[in-house]
Image (tube, grey):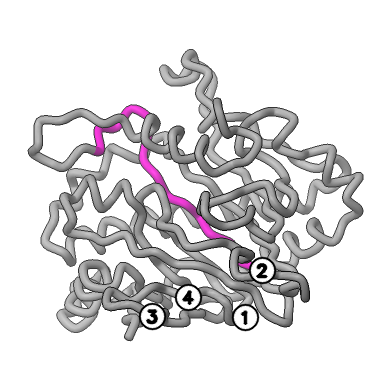
Amino acid sequence: MIPRIDAQALAAGDPGAVAATKAGAQEIGFLTVYNTALTAAEVEAALDAYRGFFKLPVALKEAVNMDRTKSNRGWGAQGSEQVDPDANPDYKQVFDCGFELPAGHPLAARDLKVYAANQWPDGMPAFQRRISDYYAKSLVVAKALLGDIIAAVGGDARYFEDAFSAPMALLRGNYYPERPAWAGEKDFGIATHTDYGCLTLLATDGSPGLEVRKRGGGWIPVSAPPGEFVINFGEMIEMWTNGAVRATPHRVVGGDAERLSIPLFFNPNYDVNVAPIGSGEVIEAGVHLTKRFNETYVHLKGD
């Protein structure tokens, strides 16, 4: 079973919350959390904003198609990603925005795609404002949760304090349409994959669809109503903590109704060393993340 955690109890060091978090992070790689600083109303408002955007005519969304900038900012049409090379491209639409470096930041001179300028649809200031506000608040929630989770598995949360001052944090709106009648065994909303970075803070509309692979085989369904969050961990944090936190494969097959979700992929600064702590190796977080993006986004393959 995937543990359900009271975020405030975890932050206060409640032994039950700490033990359940440790089990979820080390044995399953997934948690659900509630009682965070993000309210159900704020999540619902963000879901409504994304829903309105995805219902726009294709011609209007094309104006912010991420294929134009060769980055991961803006709209991605159905088939714009392929997380599993043995499956067909993923059957979903996305809208991505992320952290923009302030003028004069040392990393700005490197012209890094993971800090590309955000693309916002013209004439939709309310959409931009609502998603930007949600993004800012979700960064705060994700950083607090990451520190509490690291502490729960016996790590030093302070080690990570300075690693997220310019986070490669990507906020995504996912729109999964109804699974089409022609879909076969290689067609998924998103095929089996592990996330690439550190911590994923996932809000959903409450619809089923997300499945987590069990260690011994088979799948566990997981969902959370607006205002509660699914937490999972990526390849980077598993590597960084030398396996103290686990990245677990998961998928969305698709069903007979549409589904919306909002993951925040919370990742450190580009130049942070995410090699196993104490190993003496050097692996830049941004190098790892850029490689995985180039393997996933159809318009970046081969870059």
The answer to whether residue 208 is above or below residue 54 is: below
Which residue is rendered at x = 62% and y = 44% of the image? 97
Give the percent coordinates (x, y) of residue 94. Answer: 67, 53
Image quarter hosting the N terminus: bottom left
State the CA–CA distance, disc 2 to disc 4.
15 Å
Label 1: how many Cα within 10 Å (few below 14, some 14–19, many 20+): some
Q: In what quadrant of the picture does the C terminus appear?
A: top right
The answer to which of 29 and 255 lies nearer the viewer is: 255
Tell me, yes or no, whether the two marked residues, 2 and 1, touch with CB atoms within 8 Å.
Answer: yes
Q: How many marks?
A: 4
Q: Which of the marked residues, 2 or 1, is nearer the chain's N terminus?
A: 1
Which residue type carries mark 1? Ser
Going from N to C along the chain, the mark reached first, 1 or 3, is: 1
The reply, left or right, for residue 149 in relation to residue 87 is: left
Residue 211: give its label: 4
Does the magenta portion include 51? no
Q: Which residue is mark 3?
A: 218
- Label 2 element class: strand
Q: Is residue 126 left or right of residue 41?
A: right
Give the distance between the C-alpha atoms of the residues marked 3 and 4, in whole angstroms.
Answer: 9 Å
State the residue position of label 2: 260
Q: Earlier in the sequence, mark 3 or mark 2?
A: 3
Q: Is residue 27 left or right of residue 62?
A: left
Instruction: Report helix, strand or loop for mark 1.
Output: loop
Q: Secondary structure at mark 3?
A: loop
Q: Point out the frontmost of discs 1 and 4.
A: 4
Q: Nearer the viewer, mark 3 or mark 2?
A: 3
The amino acid beneath tag 4 is Glu
Q: For marks 2 and 1, give the CA distance.
A: 8 Å
Q: Is 259 on the left or on the right of 15, as rendered?
A: right
Residue of label 1: 207
* Magenta segment boundaries in residue numbering: 260-274
